[in-house]
Amino acid sequence: MRKIITGCLFVLVCAGISCADSDKKTAAQEESCNNPIKDPNEVKPMALMMRTMANYCDSMRLEINKGQTVDSVKYPLMPFWTAEPTDSSVLETLFFNNAKQFEAAYRQLMSNTANQKENYTAVINTCIQCHSSYCSGPLKRIKKLTLEYKSE
């Protein structure tokens, strides 16, 4: 009988200690939730614009696949080449030439509604071309934005 009582007391003491530690952990977890982790690499305006453009392209891809027409009111041209980049060494002639090609392809997409699949593909290809030379990190995401279609 004495062993049973001792065993029960031992279990109760262990449970009490465990609950006290749990309260400390909960307080620490709440503290960490109130102070979110900050990105050590400040996101630059060009990166933010490019992320927005990728979201636009994904939406355009879905609309074009449904046979809908995309327009520049819903998807405005974002002059990313004027924004501050993460790495300023990209601001060279080839980068600006790629940006001009992107702008031309974008304007063609928005002005020629008859060939939106081909023109959208040209826009995405300019993105792939530029990101093959500069900032290759987003290439995997960009390649997922391509359309699956056969030229008519």
Image (cartoon, grey):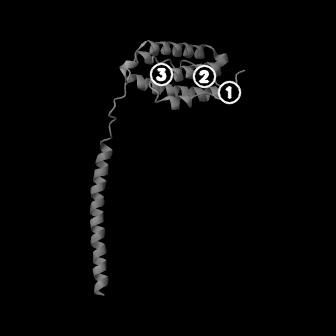
Q: Is residue 143 above or below residue 91?
A: below
Q: Quadrant location of residue 148?
A: top right
Residue 121's label in the rendered image is 2
Q: Is residue 8 left or right of residue 102?
A: left
Q: Residue placed farthest to the right in the image?
A: 152
Residue highlighted by disc 3: 133
**Residue 149: x, y in percent?**
68, 27
Residue highlighted by disc 1: 149
Q: Residue placed farthest to the front in the image?
A: 133
Front residue (pair 32, 39): 39
Q: On the rendered image, what quadrant is the C terminus found in?
A: top right
**Residue 7: x, y in percent?**
30, 79
**Residue 89: x, y in percent?**
37, 19
How many numbered tags mark residues here?
3
Query: From the viewer's perspective, is the residue at label 2 or at label 3 nearer?
Result: 3
Question: Which sits earlier in the primary sequence, circle 1 or circle 2?
Answer: 2
Characterize the local packing of mark 1: few (<14), some (14-19) or many (20 or more) Cα atoms within 10 angstroms.
few
Residue at disc 3, secondary structure: helix
Query: From the viewer's perspective, is the residue at label 1 or at label 3 nearer?
Result: 3
Front residue (pair 90, 119): 90
Residue type, numbered disc 3: Ser
Question: Which sits earlier in the primary sequence, circle 1 or circle 3?
Answer: 3
Characterize the local packing of mark 2: few (<14), some (14-19) or many (20 or more) Cα atoms within 10 angstroms.
some
Q: Is residue 125 above or below residue 35?
A: above
> How far apart, in angstroms, are the residues tagged by discs 2 and 3?
19 Å
Residue type, numbered disc 2: Thr
**Residue 145: x, y in percent?**
57, 29
Identify the residue at image location x=67%, y=26%.
67
Q: Is residue 6 above or below residue 50?
A: below
Q: Quadrant location of residue 116?
A: top right
